[in-house]
């Protein structure tokens, strides 16, 4: 008896594009997992530093909850896109989901890497996630009035609310909020430009 897994496996074996996509994203996920383990869980970059160096340089101590929040907000956005937005704008064709998945995986990886290495980077990570969420939220609402199935649209909106909530939680205070809002506006503008491309 042929299972769904067999069908998916046969499809992957017959498509070079899918194989490249899977291998590159598996490498990305494994690489980021190792970095998160070393820098956020084990704090290996600080373990061998003398105390006076730590006091003088104040090395970045990434927070695991921030990294998980970045992952959560990007996962919510991706799920919303998979449910409601494939076939909209330029995301048409049998491999439309590959572009969106790759874009959001790379965005999540860059955001997590920045949190691991650079102090104050969460304002930029939250800005990208917030701008993406808001832009896609508006697109999904427009699809609701364009005859898209109600159930799909409502579920997608709920996931986008999760992305918005996650990215708002990443906001810092003071200047970080202003930076995040500017980045969010830029990210939203970029997504609107992408969705205005012909199908």
Image (spheres, helix red, strand yellow):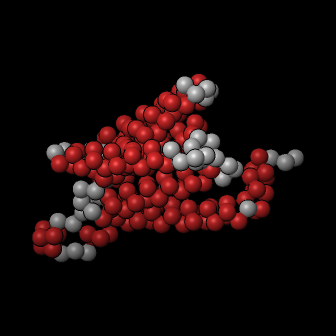
Q: Nearer the viewer, residue 30 or 192?
A: 192
Q: Nearer the viewer, residue 150 or 139?
A: 139
Q: Nearer the viewer, residue 115 or 40?
A: 115
Quarter residue 10 falls in: bottom right
Residue 68 falls left or right of residue 158: left
Residue 185 falls left or right of residue 81: left
Q: Nearer the viewer, residue 153 or 38?
A: 153
Residue 160 falls left or right of residue 16: left
Quarter residue 119 falls in: bottom left
Can you give x and y, in whole percent of width and height, for residue 67 in the image?
37, 52
Is residue 86 depicted above or below 55 in this figure? above
Can you give x and y, in whole percent of width and height, for residue 173 in the image?
19, 44
Is residue 82 visible from the viewing direction of this image? no
Is residue 85 visible from the viewing direction of this image? yes
**Count of residue discs:** 0
Can you give x and y, in whole percent of width and height, for residue 122 in the image?
29, 52
Furthest-front residue in this view: 198
Residue 109 falls left or right of residue 88: left
Q: Residue placed at 24% from the left, 50% from the top? A: 179
Q: Residue placed at 16% from the left, 45% from the top? A: 174
Q: Residue placed at 61% from the left, 29% from the top? A: 148
Q: Residue placed at 74% from the left, 52% from the top? A: 8
Can you give x and y, in whole percent of width and height, for residue 52 in the image?
12, 73
């Amino acid at each position: 008896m042929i299972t769904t897994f067999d069908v998916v496996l046969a499809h992957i074996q017959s498509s070079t594009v899918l194989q490249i996509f899977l291998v590159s994203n598996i490498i990305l996920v494994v690489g980021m997992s190792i970095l998160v383990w070393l820098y956020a869980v084990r704090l290996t970059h600080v373990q061998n530093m003398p105390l006076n160096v730590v006091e003088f340089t104040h090395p970045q101590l990434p927070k695991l909850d921030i990294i998980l929040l970045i992952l959560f907000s990007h996962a919510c956005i991706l799920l919303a896109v998979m449910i409601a937005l494939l076939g909209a704008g330029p995301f048409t064709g049998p491999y439309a989901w590959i572009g969106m998945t790759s874009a959001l995986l790379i965005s999540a990886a860059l955001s997590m890497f920045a949190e691991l290495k650079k102090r104050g980077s969460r304002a930029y990570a939250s800005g990208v996630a917030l701008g993406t969420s808001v832009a896609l939220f508006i697109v999904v609402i427009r699809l609701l009035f364009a005859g898209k199935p109600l159930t799909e649209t409502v579920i997608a909106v709920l996931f986008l609310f999760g992305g918005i909530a996650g990215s708002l939680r990443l906001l810092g205070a003071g200047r970080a909020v202003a930076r995040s809002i500017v980045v969010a506006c830029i990210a939203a503008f970029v997504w609107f430009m992408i969705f205005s491309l012909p199908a």
